[in-house]
Each structure stands twice: as C-alpha cells, then as structure tokens.
Image (cartoon, helix red, strand yellow):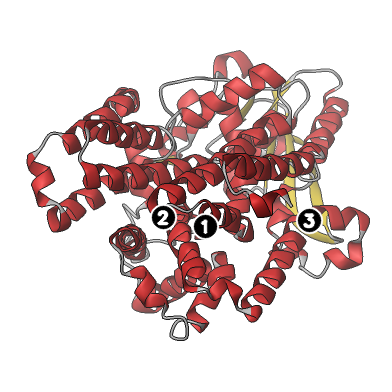
Amino acid sequence: MYFKKNYGWKSIILLYLGVSFFRFLFVISEWVDLDAEETQYWLWSKHLDLSYYSKPPLIAYLNKITSFIFGDYPWAVRINAIFYGAIIGLATYHIVLKIYNSKKMAFFISAGLLFLPSYHYISLFFTTDVLVSLFWLLTCYYFWIAIQHNKLKYWIFTGIAMGLGMLSKYAILFFIPFSLFYLLIKKRELLKQKGYYISLAIAFLMFSPVIYWNIKNGMVGMFHVTTLAGSGHDIIHWERLLSRQAELIGGQLLLNVPLLFIIVFWDKYKIKSYLKGDFEQYIIATTIFIYIIFSLVTIIRRVYINWLLFSYIPLYIVLLTTVWRSGLIKEKSVKKYLAITSGLILLLIFQPILNIYAKPVSKIIPAQIDPFRNLVNWEEFATYVYTEMDKQCNGEEYVVLSNRYQVASEFAYYGPNLPATYCYPYKKRRMNQFDLWGIPYNQIKDKKAVFVDNIPMDDDMISKIGSENIIYKTVYSIEYKGVIVRNYYIYLINKMPEFPNAKKVISKF
C-alpha cells in the first residue's frame, strides 16, 4: 500500500534496498564461483598501480576497499556490483524525475530496469561493465543538462562523470567524439565557449595517471584497445562479415528481448511520436553512434554481446518512458509478456540453485548454453589440483602456471592461502597483466612446475620441456547439470622450464 501512495525517494530507496538484500543472499550463498574476470580484477587489487594492461585502475581500488573491510570473500567482491547496480537504479529515478518531472513515472521507469537481463548481469557480477554503465549514464545526463543551461557546475559534473568513466573502462572515451559531433550539429555556439573544454580538461586530468602509466609501460593499454578494435587483423571476407553482423544484431536483440514488444505496437500506440523530443533524440543518437562503431569493428574482428551494454541504460530510460507515456504499459498482452520474460529471467538467474535442488527443472536450459557453466567448480578444481600436487611432490615446493590468465587468476583466488600463480607464454597468445608482472624465474627455477590448461600439450611444447621431465599428468573434468562442460589438462614438471624466446610468444596486438 505504501508504494501506491508514495513514489518519492523513500519508496525507490526501499525498493532497491529490498532488491539488494535478495541479491546479497544470492551472492553470499556462493552457488556460483567468481568469474575469471572478477578474480583477475581482485588480483589486481593485491598489486595496486596507476593502471593495468587491459583496464584502468578504478575496479582494482574498489576491490581493495571491500576486501580490506570485509576480507577476501566472494561476496566481498560482488557486493560492489550490488551497490553500484543499485546506484544505477537510483540515478535512473533522479534523471527521469528531473527530465519529466513525475515521481510516479520516475519510480516505475527505475523499477522497469528489473525486467531487463542486462541490468541484472551488471548488478550481480563485478566487472567493469557496471562501473562504465553508471558513469556513461551520468556523463550523458550531465552533458545534456550542461548544453541546456550552459552553467559551469554542470560542465564540471560532466567532466567528473566522464573522468570516473575513463578510470573504469576505455569505452567511455567514445563519448568524446560523439559529444564533439553533437555540438557541431546542434549547439555549435558552445564550442566557442569554455564550458565544454573545462569538462574535457577535468576528465583528462583525472585520467592523467592512466596516461602516465601507459607512457611508462610502452603504451600497452592502448595496444590492448587497438587489438580489441581489430588492429593487426585482415579485413574478412564478406560472408564472414555478414555472419558477424548477424551475430551482433542477434546478440543485441537477445540482450534486450523484454523490450521487443514495442515493435509490435509501434503504429497502434504511435511510438515514434514519443521519440521525437530533443532529449529522446539525443539519447538515441548516442546509442546509434556506439552501434556504428562496433558494427565497423566487425569488419576485422568478432564483437562480443556485452561490449555495447554500457551504452544501454540511457536508452532504456527513453524506451521505458515511451512505454509509460504512450499508455502501452496498460496493454494486457504487454503485461503478460513482461510477466513471462520476468519469469524467464528468474529461471535463468536461479539455474545454479535449481541444479542443486531441482535438477530436472534446471535442464530446461541445457548446460551447453547456460551462461553459468563457466562459473561452477573453480574452487573444487583448485582444491583438487593443490591437494593432488601436494601428494605428488611429497612436501616439495611447486608453482602453478597456465597459458591462460583466466586459469591463473582463478587459481590465485581459490588456491590455499591465496598462492602466487603465473601465466606462462608457452603458446602464441595475446599479452595480459601477468606478463607485465613477469615471472621471478631466479626465485622459482629449482621448484617443480604444475601446468594447467584447457587443451593438452602439443608435441612442440613437450619437446621444449622434454618428455622425460613430465613426471605426472591427469585430466580434470568439470560437470554441470550432469554434463561435462570443461576439461583441464594438468602436468607436473620436475623443474621450472625456461624458454629463451618466451617474450616472442606474446603478442601485444
């Protein structure tokens, strides 16, 4: 009854406190392990720096704060995602309230985020996606307010939001060319005034430690970004390009499936007329700009489904307000559609729980396509490897290595007493943060080495090590929903190998 009478700040805060409580229960239960990206960013927090190979440093410092306060528990990592996800919900309420001047609309638009799978993803798993989504939203909002009122404080807020975004993920840099193009087309007179340049100066001042770190480390962060953008790749054949375009479009539609009903009722509810406002057109333009960029990237490489996610929260605001203002929300079929999609989202989120307590129901979503398949049994796997190697080594010291930073990061987190692990470049691969930290070869050269990888050693690798030096090998299979979803190959080597050409194996591009 309270929510029916009051749609103010107390109501929306209570809503997100409740949602955060249930998310915290999900996280603290540890039905799923930390993702490899989460353990990687946690590991960065143990080696604080001005930046890192693939990302700016903010996520590492936030992990440092929560692990210092709460300890190195999985929930202490993911509590960040829960918190900043709730902040996105509250920021959405504030933005709708300021733009449309309706508490009731602001409440329901903010609550509408809970129907969207992409929002649940960034609010449950602590990757850079939740941070860049938040600061992209705030940058878009404050930039809009700044160009409407041209007051210094709004330009300062724009710069701060953009700067925090730049400390979260390089993707926020896309806002700079967009903002320049937008001003050239819509508000050219503002380019002759100081406000816009003050916002950029603030953002780059905040970003300057990352720039300094990149200069000091051979611009490896920039190399990483150009790698993801396709640098060094040949332009692909048109058939593969069409395939990647179809994958990009299909992935984005799948990500936003709860909102697809808008297309069905486009004409009946005159949806287009609600998207003609200046604010709506501005937000749509930001989304189109980002889509065009990543569409061009498909010419030279594959684009993953979550890469565009950071730009969607402002678009969700526009689309959900359109649903509200047009009266489409009152359509009975829409309510049924939202109820069904909400049920499917809950079914997906609770797959790990169903796998434990209701296995037949969990198999509705096959293990091979269940996104949680990569988040199970890491702790058991690491425990098995260290226990088995302790037996094989009879008390002698050993180190764990992998060619994959994902495996090295998971083992660093889930191994006993948070052990040091290394990412050894014994196959052609892209550079990662482990390579910048290096391997203290002189300190560990006489120790046994345990290699863990998701593919078996090939003949070239075995010849470099020497087959006689492999004193034990085994395979560990990870099962989920009664199906083997991953195999890992484990080798115990009697002495830490050294490859003189290891650096040549690493590619910065």
Residue 490, visible in the rendered structure: yes
Give the image quarter of residue 214.
top left
SS for dot 2: helix
Question: Mark 3 highlights which residue?
Answer: 350
The amino acid type found where label 3 is placed reads Phe
Quadrant, the C terminus: top left
In the image as oriented, which residue stretches furthest toward the front?
Answer: 5
Looking at the picture, does residue 272 appear above or below residue 399? below
The amino acid type found where label 2 is placed reads Tyr
Q: Position of residue 122 (x, y in %)?
A: 58, 47
Tell me if label 1 and label 2 are in contact, CB under 8 Å.
yes
Question: Mark 1 highlights which residue?
Answer: 105
Q: Position of residue 6 (x, y in %)?
A: 62, 48
Q: In this orientation, which residue lies closer to the viewer: 298 or 202?
A: 202
Which callout, 1 or 3, points at the residue further toward the start of the chain?
Answer: 1
SS for dot 1: helix
Question: Mark 2 highlights which residue?
Answer: 100
Q: In this orientation, which residue lies closer to the viewer: 2 or 168?
A: 2
Residue at 55%, 52% (x, y): give it. 110
Q: CA distance from mark 1 to mark 3?
A: 30 Å
In the image as oriented, which residue stretches furthest toward the bottom?
Answer: 268
Q: Position of residue 33 (x, y in %)?
A: 74, 42
Q: Residues within 10 Å of mark 2 (few under 14, many from 20)?
A: few
Residue at 37%, 35% (x, y): give it. 161
Q: Describe residue 421's horizontal placement relative to residue 492 as left or right.
A: left
Which callout, 2 or 3, points at the residue further toward the start of the chain?
Answer: 2
SS for dot 3: loop
Q: CA distance from mark 1 to mark 2?
A: 8 Å
Q: Residues within 10 Å of mark 3 (few under 14, many from 20)?
A: some
Q: In this orientation, which residue lies closer to the viewer: 191 or 280?
A: 280
